[in-house]
Amino acid sequence: MSNFEYALAPESTAILNIAPQYGLFIGGKFVDSKSQQFFSTINPATEKVISQISLATEADVDFAVASARTAYNKVWSKLSAAERGKYLFRIARILQERAREFAVLETLDNGKPIRESRDVDVPLSAAHFFYHAGWADKLSHAGFGSDPKPHGVVAQIIPWNFPLLMLAWKVAPALATGNTVVLKPAETTPMTALLFAEVCQQAGLPDGVVNIVTGDGSTGALLVNHPDVDKIAFTGSTSVGKAIARAVSGTKKSLTLELGGKAANIVFDDAPIDETVEGIVNGIFFNQGHVCCAGSRLLVQENVSDQILEKLKHRMSQIRVGDPMDKNTDLGAINSSEQLARINELANSGDAEGAERWSPACELPTTGFWYPPTIFTGVTQAHRIAREEIFGPVLSVLTFRTPQEAIEKANNTPYGLSAGVWSDKGSRILWASQRLRAGVIWANTFNKFDPASPFGGYKESGWGREGGRHGLAAYVKGGK
Ligand code: NAI
Ligand code: MG
């Protein structure tokens, strides 16, 4: 078969209206930070500065928490559940109306392909608001007692891999259950959260119900340690998650943590080969592998491993790496130079420890942060690339002979967020799923998300669930 050629298909950024500088969103308004300190957010595909972002310090965090407290006491806790639901429906609809703007801005700030921000991040974010809008007036039927109560003021800290989607996962259930929010986006990807602040204004959401403070880890730590915060929800690295757990222990604050992963994607010898190869590619190269539930450890049954690897390499040679704004791009930019350095460091340890590296020939742009789709074969369980989260487009391939060996290797990790099973036999899928210690298990598919389905991990992957009825439990007092 001859090569398909693709003409350039860049998405225009003309729809965006970006200010040179942003304040903080507190009490329903954009306000100057008291610190008057700024940092830049850049486009990781070009290294060009997008805007100057305020760094919130102690006085700003105090102001934001106070505004969330006032909104909770005076307005939000007094509103009927049905009225709360109306605001969520309105936000969901505005996200749909402004979907293109959000997708372009997300891709600009994060580096992910426009195809993904347009077809995954933004529609799923709207879906989260619709789903939780429906829950708002039905909480007394959710199994949390006849009159479940919110915590009050919730601090939410999110990472850079799915900026708008993680905002939606946090804000939608918090508001549906009657909490008010102070949210801190990640320092490399604050733009869609700031655009979301405009959506809150447009929806007429009462002032102070959602507050957005931009900043870095120091801002996050101020929020975590603030005495007037009732609950903390965090998504990010396991090391920061552990630090937050230590900071909160001994306080009355409630805590949910969504942390890292090192998911096994298990391929049995009766798996449908071509679908499996697509699933492996989706599992590790979706969003440049910046996915906590990425299928980053491929466990393939030995008697089919040559065949699978040959097809996988062929498929990887078709992956188009480059301009995230191009609608044909499959693999965009790595989110930051720091993340690129982490990927390099771990991948180099794979070489040093004796695994064999393979990448298809691909030309990487000269500016920006890039990493080619990469697989390592000959990986053993002792290798760092089999144990540590790489959070990049790098797949570690291990083999197994018996189903029991597959389960033992899959569970041999400090994490337990997700797993995949590929097999023609339903009985084998059920047998494996019952033995895998992972919060989410995909069968003959991977990276499927739905607001109605709970998501979360075992062990060092975190505490609590997001999505579905289980996710609501984290936002009501005594919820289980
Ligand atoms: P990180 O955990 O430092 O950042 C996540 C969020 O936490 C950001 O908003 C950050 O400003 C905030 N933060 C940082 N330090 C904090 C503190 N002491 N208290 C409160 N908030 C704090 O993640 P980072 O450094 O960007 O990435 C490092 C590694 O973490 C990645 O290579 C990846 O392996 C993993 N990671 C996992 C994610 C996941 O979804 N599971 C998301 C992001 C990173
Ligand atoms: Mg950025």
Image (cartoon, rainbow, N blue to C red):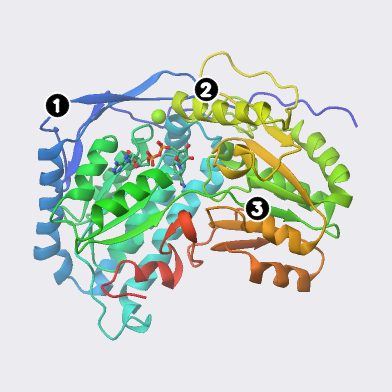
Would you say 246 lies left or right of 427 here? left
The residue furthest top is 366
Q: Which quadrant would residue 4 be assigned to in this image?
A: top right
- Going 55% across and 27% down the picture, which residue do you hit? 345
Q: Is residue 100 above or below residue 438?
A: above
Q: Which residue is mark 3?
A: 264
3D distance between C-alphas at marks 1 and 2: 29 Å
Q: Residue at x 26, y 78 (%)?
A: 148
Which callout, 3 or 1, points at the residue further toward the start of the chain?
1
Q: Residues within 10 Å of mark 2 (few under 14, many from 20)?
A: many
Is ligand 1 within 8 Å of the beta carbon of the residue shown at mark 1?
no
Q: Which residue is nearer to you in this view: 58 or 143?
A: 58
Labels 3 and 2 touching (C-beta < 8 A): no
Image quadrant holding the N terminus, namely: top right
Residue 36: give its label.
1
Helix, strand or loop at mark 3: strand
**Which three-letter amino acid code belongs to the residue tagged 3?**
Ala
Q: Position of residue 37 (x, y in %)?
A: 18, 25
Query: Which is more N-terminal, label 2 or label 3?
Result: 3
What residue appears at the point 59 percent right and 44 percent down from the top-left corner? 387
Q: Marks 3 and 1: CB-CB under 8 Å?
A: no
Q: Are marks 1 and 2 in contact (CB under 8 Å)?
A: no
Q: Is mark 3 within 8 Å of ligand 1?
A: no
State the CA–CA distance, disc 3 to disc 2: 27 Å
The quarter of the image holding the C terminus is: bottom left
Where is mark 2, residue-wise? Answer: 369
Marks 3, 1: nearer the viewer: 3
In the displayed image of the protein, which residue is found farthest to the bottom? 146
Task: Give the x, y percent position of residue 13.
Answer: 45, 28
